[in-house]
Amino acid sequence: MSPALFLVWHGAPGARLEIGDPSHPLSDQMLMVRTQRTLSRLYHAIKHQLPEDTALCVAPLADDPKFKGMAEGALKWLRGGA
């Protein structure tokens, strides 16, 4: 099974998350993650690193997202170049 791509957004500006899987920031509070973990396992791994009442959204992506104006290197990472 190939790794799934997830989009993660959290409401903790400046938080430094230890993902343990390939990831790339899109902005200060948003990142993409490629992982073999389930949605639930990834969500809980991130949730436990954030302050208790912090907003969090983790969503699986069926295909690569389209975007512009995101952090440098995001498109290269998405295409497997980083």
Image (tube, grey):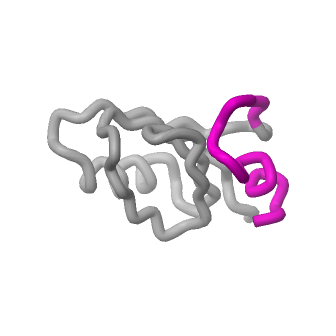
Helix, strand or loop for the magenta stretch, by majority: loop
Say which residue appears at 15% left-offset and 41% top-offset: 52
At horizontal 59% and vertical 42% (from top left) the residue drawn is 26
**As displayed, is residue 59 above or below residue 48?**
above
Asked if residue 78 lies in the magenta stretch, the reply is yes
Residue at (38%, 58%) from the top-left corner?
A: 17
Q: Quadrant of the C terminus?
A: bottom right
Give the image location of residue 62, x and y in percent: 74, 37
Q: Quadrant of residue 2?
A: bottom right
Quadrant showing the N terminus: bottom right
Specify start and end residues of the magenta stretch as a single range: 65-82
Residue furthest out toward the bottom: 20
User: How many numbered marks have been drawn onto this rendered protein structure?
Assistant: 0
Q: Position of residue 43 (x, y in %)?
A: 40, 47
Image point (43%, 33%), residue name: 57
Question: In this rendering, is residue 37 above or below 11?
Answer: below
Task: Tell me: residue 55, above or below residue 19.
Answer: above
Inspect the magenta stretch and tell me whether residue 72 lies in it. Answer: yes
- 29 or 37, nearer to the observer: 29
Q: In the rendered image, which quarter is residue 23 located in?
A: bottom right
